[in-house]
């Protein structure tokens, strides 16, 4: 318990000292404000109503990206300072540390995601689609965090890698512009499935559930693969 308290206290200090982390923490809320008040104006002014699903899915994918990168950089800092080795010998252990680190961005993404869908999204989803989009984006944040810490050797490499990971949010463009079944090639990417739910007819419940379940499976497999890679890298 004391190790967990130390971890939470360390997080608060890190966020307070590092303007980048602080901006990342409040960034999704600023994004939601932008979508709520600016996108409706742009849609009317430039006749973008045909792109509502594209816009809605693109902006919601930015939420786990921002939160996941923030958590990933914190993990890279702790690995560089050998803090992960410290937590490994406490009652928290490495598995407990990893659970905390993955749970935190997931919970933040859920909170921001619900606010976005209920208050700011240009598209209203059905209850079934919403109940699937939220867990999918919640898993997206830990995937991005794990991707940074499992693939990058240090924070500089992590910064470069984060730019490549950021390309995942452009998957709605593939869904929108690539015709028919061809865009399902993008299904190997975990962000595809949450975005795809914005383009499915709400009345087609079976398709919504199928896409949601496939998305959960792909995201869980990504988390398991990256977790094993992270644990091997920190042994």
Image (spheres, grey):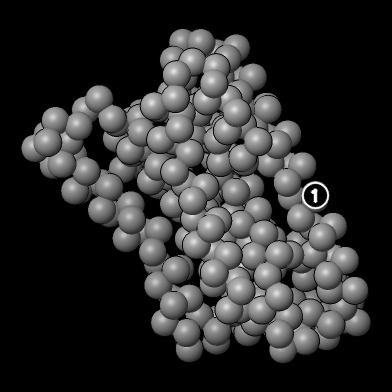
- Nearer the observer, 35 or 153: 153
Image coordinates of residue 223 in percent, x first then y, are: 74, 50
Residue shown at the point (40%, 58%) measured from the top left: 28
Q: Is residue 50 visible?
A: yes
Residue sitting nearer the eye, 171 or 203: 171
> What is the x, y in percent for residue 37?
20, 48
Mark 1 — residue? 224
Q: Position of residue 51 (x, y in %)?
A: 28, 30
**In this view, 164 is above or below 203:** below
Question: What residue sits 40% from the left and 67% below the top?
Answer: 26
Q: Going by the image, does 123 lie left or right of 93?
A: left
Question: Is residue 228 rendered to the left or right of residue 19?
Answer: right
Where on the picture, by quarter, is residue 181?
A: top right
- Quarter of the image holding residue 141? bottom right
- Quick check: 11 above or below 38? below
Q: Secondary structure at mark 1?
A: helix
Q: How many marks?
A: 1
Snapshot quadrant of residue 189: top right
């Amino acid at each position: 318990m004391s190790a967990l308290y130390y971890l939470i206290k360390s997080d608060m200090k890190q966020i307070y000292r590092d303007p980048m982390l602080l901006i990342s923490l409040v960034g999704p809320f600023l994004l939601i404000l932008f979508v709520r008040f600016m996108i409706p104006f742009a849609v009317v002014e430039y006749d973008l109503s045909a792109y509502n699903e594209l816009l809605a899915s693109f902006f919601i994918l930015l939420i786990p990206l921002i939160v996941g990168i923030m958590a990933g950089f914190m993990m890279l800092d702790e690995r560089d300072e050998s803090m992960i080795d410290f937590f490994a010998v406490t009652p928290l252990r490495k598995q407990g540390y990893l659970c905390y680190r993955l749970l935190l961005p997931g919970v933040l993404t859920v909170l921001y995601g619900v606010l976005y869908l209920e208050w700011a999204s240009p598209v209203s989803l059905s209850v079934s689609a919403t109940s699937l989009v939220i867990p999918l984006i919640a898993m997206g944040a830990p995937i991005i965090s794990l991707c940074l810490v499992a693939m990058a050797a240090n924070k500089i490499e992590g910064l470069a890698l984060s730019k490549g990971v950021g390309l995942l949010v452009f998957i709605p463009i593939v869904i929108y512009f690539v015709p028919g079944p061809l865009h399902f090639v993008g299904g190997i990417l975990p962000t595809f499935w949450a975005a795809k739910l914005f383009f499915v007819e709400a009345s087609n419940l079976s398709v919504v559930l199928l896409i949601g379940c496939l998305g959960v499976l792909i995201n869980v497999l990504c988390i398991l693969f990256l977790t094993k890679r992270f644990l091997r890298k920190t042994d």
